[in-house]
Image (cartoon, coloured by chain):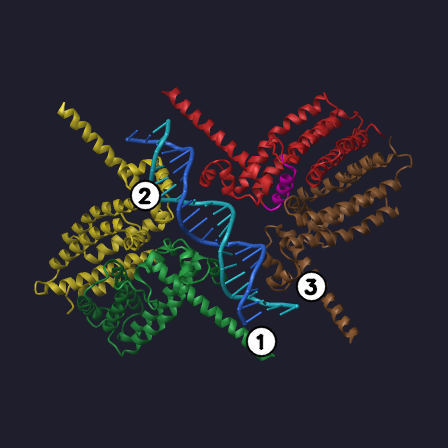
Chain colours: A brown, B red, C green, D yellow, E cyan, F blue
Amino acid sequence: MRKALQQGSNARAERARVQRDRILDAAQRCFSERGFHGASMSMIAETAQMSPGLIYRYFAGKSELIHGIVSRQSELLADDFEQLESGAQHPVDGIVEKYRECASYNHDNQISLRHLDATLLLEIVAESRRDPVIAEAMGLLDQRINHGLGQWLAQSSTSDVSPQRLQARALILRALLDGLKMRQARDPDLDLGLLREGLQDVFPCLQGKAA
Amino acid sequence: MRKALQQGSNARAERARVQRDRILDAAQRCFSERGFHGASMSMIAETAQMSPGLIYRYFAGKSELIHGIVSRQSELLADDFEQLESGAQHPVDGIVEKYRECASYNHDNQISLRHLDATLLLEIVAESRRDPVIAEAMGLLDQRINHGLGQWLAQSSTSDVSPQRLQARALILRALLDGLKMRQARDPDLDLGLLREGLQDVFPCLQGKAA
Amino acid sequence: MRKALQQGSNARAERARVQRDRILDAAQRCFSERGFHGASMSMIAETAQMSPGLIYRYFAGKSELIHGIVSRQSELLADDFEQLESGAQHPVDGIVEKYRECASYNHDNQISLRHLDATLLLEIVAESRRDPVIAEAMGLLDQRINHGLGQWLAQSSTSDVSPQRLQARALILRALLDGLKMRQARDPDLDLGLLREGLQDVFPCLQGKAA
Amino acid sequence: MRKALQQGSNARAERARVQRDRILDAAQRCFSERGFHGASMSMIAETAQMSPGLIYRYFAGKSELIHGIVSRQSELLADDFEQLESGAQHPVDGIVEKYRECASYNHDNQISLRHLDATLLLEIVAESRRDPVIAEAMGLLDQRINHGLGQWLAQSSTSDVSPQRLQARALILRALLDGLKMRQARDPDLDLGLLREGLQDVFPCLQGKAA
DNA sequence: CATGAATGAGCCTTCATTCAT
DNA sequence: CATGAATGAAGGCTCATTCAT
């Protein structure tokens, strides 16, 4: 009896997870295409093939959708850092490759749910300044990225670099990456060769191998 | 008679200029506080102490307000590049100083009309993907910044750097600067010392003096 | 199960039909009283006892309301022509009677939804010159009337009348009828006796029995 | 001295007349092109090459413009009836010719100030039901037309036709003419040959020569 | 759990009219 | 007489959210 109940409960929870994901997929797609303010709840509902009302059973409101999207993205991030830290790929190659991935989707007007559309990201950051719900999600994402970046810098730098300097470089690297994302939003067809060349110039510095 | 007419015309033109500026001031303030979609035309009108209808005598619509704001900012940019190119200040100091200026306003919840609020900038970039009017304004701004940055890099690098490498570095520098702006939006109280330290690490590379 | 679903679907469709009709009724009433531009959507919504937003679930915009009104009227037209063609009533009597019906409502400041208020019709025709949605509706109405009139003239004329002459007479008859409607808008209390007398004078010509 | 004053007064009155006419010309043009509600006072002012405010020195409001247009038209009418009554032209030819005149302007998207655009006329009639100012002007126009039509019918009919019958025929003729105008609004490119043929069929009846 | 009809506040924009100059 | 900047009410329409079914 207990088992049956638990099974029922599990099944229910599983179903909820599936529904939430379906909604987030639709939301991310719509937000990417039309922007946070441009995409309506009904449009998202339609994309998710459900009624508008049902969304509110799983999310408290529109902002929560962003929250959900950012949180989900947060988890995907682990993979990227794993690869970076594994050293299997040169960091420059890693960044260029990642950039190419995001941009290609953007360019083909397809949307990859694995990456946050550059424009959407900007909107989210902007919105996070005014919406505490979104701010919370972004805070978490920020923390993870900082942690991951810090970790990698620590391992890839020589051991005589002071922790503060490490932090400083993390800050710069972070800014560089964010700025690249912003550029992606402005002109999606950036010359990848140029990007690689530029990165190769600065990376030694960031790893302290140029001093 | 002619003189009187011309005076009248001048006075009219002057008044128009004043009104336009008053509106743009109000708009920039409102957009910074509530976002492009969050600030309503009547709110802007109220801030500018005029009727909503009057705004439309000077601007064709809401997007044109952004256009106006960006264009105004575009002009202020010249000063920044002048200072950068004059070499009177080390670029790292210039950037840190500029950053401090923007951030301080941001932090005090005041708004400086001399600087584009970081959050607003993100929104503008995001919106520019969908709104041709805003896109045009941003295109112009982009061009100016790229030109300015290119110029400075060319003059501050050794002469044996290939044009393509110069371009690559401009790209990276641009991204770095953009990313810093983005960071400003995320966490306004950044440690300026850390920022300086980080910049000092990478700038030699960007100027080709680290190879 | 299937049956239940179908019932649900039917009920929904039925409700939609009812709502659409309720809106059209309200719109026709408001347009008749205040004109197309004088009647606001909220006024119509209030008359229909619903919120303004709901109207847009059933009609894409204000013009579509006119479209709906005209289409509805279009269907009622069939009855009129049936009676005309049945020959149960002399055409002159039919026209006078129809005129009396419309005018009486008009005169009592009541509005009959079964007849298009003369003033409203004029507005619709005028608006159809500028609004494609309305133009389409009027085009359909025109076609039906022309067809009906043509049919009746063909059957009530002697067989030796050329098709072109038939067309010419249809044109004149149509103009006469339209003009009567226009007169109705100008001075609603027209002497019906006079009208009958006048019609009796010209009808023989239109049927070719006066040559 | 008196003379000078009077001259001044005359000149002033003359100037006023010119200004009024200039405004009415612009208004008629704008109304014809965009409709009563679609043409704004500023648009009319611009067309008349003056400031919006100045219009209000000569006309109390938008409705008065219609009033002025209709009144002016009223005077032009005399010529038409004069020609009709002179008998220099067969009435059928006269009507067809008049129709052609109006339609040709309509069709070429030019606007003749000598004729009321068909669409505008419909709007005016519709508006006259709600606006007393316009109603008054239309009342006058109606009266003149009725008088003119009555006069002509009386002179062109045989003397044994009763006055009531004359009235009845005037009513029908009026409706026919109005309806033709309405048709002009609906489909501007009407076959003139067809029109003439149709008119030739009914005119004998209207003149009582077919009974 | 799911639906989707319904709400109603609020948005951007227009425009007839006024009035200080 | 003339200007045109300024007003402010109103209009059409959208959409996040709720709730009866």
Compared with A58, B154 (above or below) is above
The answer to whether tags 2 and 1 share a subunit is no
Residue C99: x and y, percent? 26, 67
Compared with D166, B73 (above or below) is above
Total marks placed? 3
Q: Is residue B124 magenta?
A: yes
- Marks 2 and 1, how far apart in space? 59 Å
One can see residue C135 in this view: no
Numbered mark located on residue A19 in the image: 3
Of residues A30 and C124, the one nearer the viewer is A30
Q: Which residue is mark 1?
A: C5
Q: Amino acid at mark 2?
A: Ala
Image quadrant where one finds the C terminus of chain C: bottom left
Residue drawn at x 52%, y 31% as measured from the top left: B21
Query: SS for tag 3?
Result: helix
Q: Is residue B107 left or right of residue D207?
A: right
Q: Which residue is mark 2?
A: D27
The answer to whether tags 1 and 3 share a subunit is no
Residue D86: x and y, percent? 14, 52
Residue drawn at x 36%, y 58% as measured from the top left: C124
Q: Is residue B52 magenta?
A: no
